[in-house]
Amino acid sequence: MKACFLGTNFEKMIEKKLLILCVIAGFFQSAYGENLDINIYKRESDTIYNTIRVSGMGGTGTVFPANFETLLFNSAGLSGKIQNREEPIFMGISVDSFFRPEYIVPIFSGITKSDNPVGTILINAKELITSSGVGASVGFGFGFMPEKTTLGFGVHGGISVFLNGKPFPLGTEGYIKMSVNFPLAYGWNVFSSEKNRLDLGVNFHPEIAVIKGLNGSDIDALSGGTTTVGKLISDAVDNPYYSFPFDFGAIYSFLGKPYRGAEIRIAFNGKNFLGNYFGPGNKIVPLKKEIILNLGTGLYLPFEIFTVKSSCLLSAEFYDINQIFIGYSDFWKSLRLGAEINVGNVVFLRGGLNSGYPSIGAEVRFLGFGVGFSWETIEKGLYIGDNPLSVLRLAVEIY
């Protein structure tokens, strides 16, 4: 039975939006396959929405989470005094993709004369759908972290399309996912002195997700015009997934001066406790959110450039360290390194390494607005070099 709110106009609107994303997916390669094998689910380690700051710094968000990142990576940062709470309100929109300009002409070839433009695009994209995958994501985030409190709440989510498989379409596996998360986080200071402080945090972030798995028969049906993107997604809306996970975080700081000057941090974050999916969708295709444990350390160093107050961040983190212990990952694949130069809280230059793959980023903030980009490569396979996926993330943010 169809969901009562799905009318004809709604389905047409959804189909148009998904058609745009499928067009994008034909010539955009995205890092946000989210490790999702819709038939044999392994892990889901990333949300659709991410920040250009963390992705530009090699994926390091555990040690120095800033602003909205306290609701994504480590809620203990809500209680911190340095590099965490510059602005109480955050809004952001990001588009995640790897642009391949050489694909523009062949991907659109013949669609103006076709009665089935989606099918034509998929047929044209045949050579692009490989084991590495192609896709695109559009994400959004809003957070409110009231001043003089250690509380934060907000909403983030988006829509993601991903296809991989070889040969295409028989070996295709992929998905269309829409999700919304509602984080509610609290940080508190356990103790503090002139040289040390310990902050803890907890983050409760319910999620509602609609996930439609795509396989070879779906691609054949889309190519042949016997089904539509709107029909596929409307069927999935009737079977949503729900989860109610908790995250826990801790940051221990060694302070050069009381809450000012240089700072060394050791940080920990555990994600997705009690976070398994349930609901109608999970009865049809069971999916699982596994616990992720992250550990890191970093250095914050303030300085001045011609009297302009600036700072440098250096961080090193081990992501998903529990996978090392059970043999699904190794030391180098888990290692993430990041750096950021902040010039007057206006110009930000970033770089890092994620599983040995380089990342870069830059951002300019002015009059409460931020515009920037990040470029990173994430290893989605079992070992380095197995299945690297690159992403160009463009973002506009309001502080």
Image (cartoon, rainbow, N blue to C red):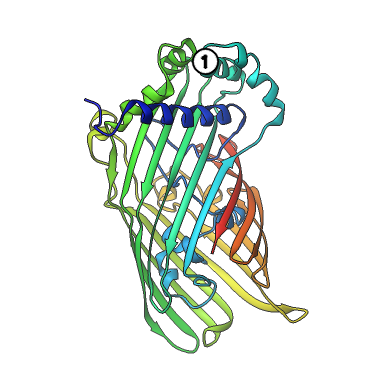
Q: Is residue 345 above or below residue 333?
A: below
Q: Is residue 254 above or below residue 346?
A: below
Name the outermost residue toward the front: 9
In the image, residue 335 lies at what x, y percent?
55, 54
In the image, residue 378 lies at what x, y percent?
56, 43
Give me the residue at 61% from left, 19% from top: 127
Q: Is residue 255 above or below residue 283?
A: below
In the image, residue 82 lies at what x, y percent?
53, 76
Residue 225 visible: yes
Q: List the residue tagged with mark 1.
A: 119
Residue 40 visible: no
Mark 1: few/some/many CA within 10 Å (<14, 14-19, 20+): many
Horizontally, residue 345 falls left or right of residue 208, namely right
Give me the residue at 21% from left, 25% from top: 1
Horizontally, residue 107 falls left or right of residue 34, namely right
Q: Is residue 310 above or below residue 314?
A: below
Horizontally, residue 248 falls left or right of residue 56, namely left
Q: Determine which quarter of the picture holds residue 114.
A: top right
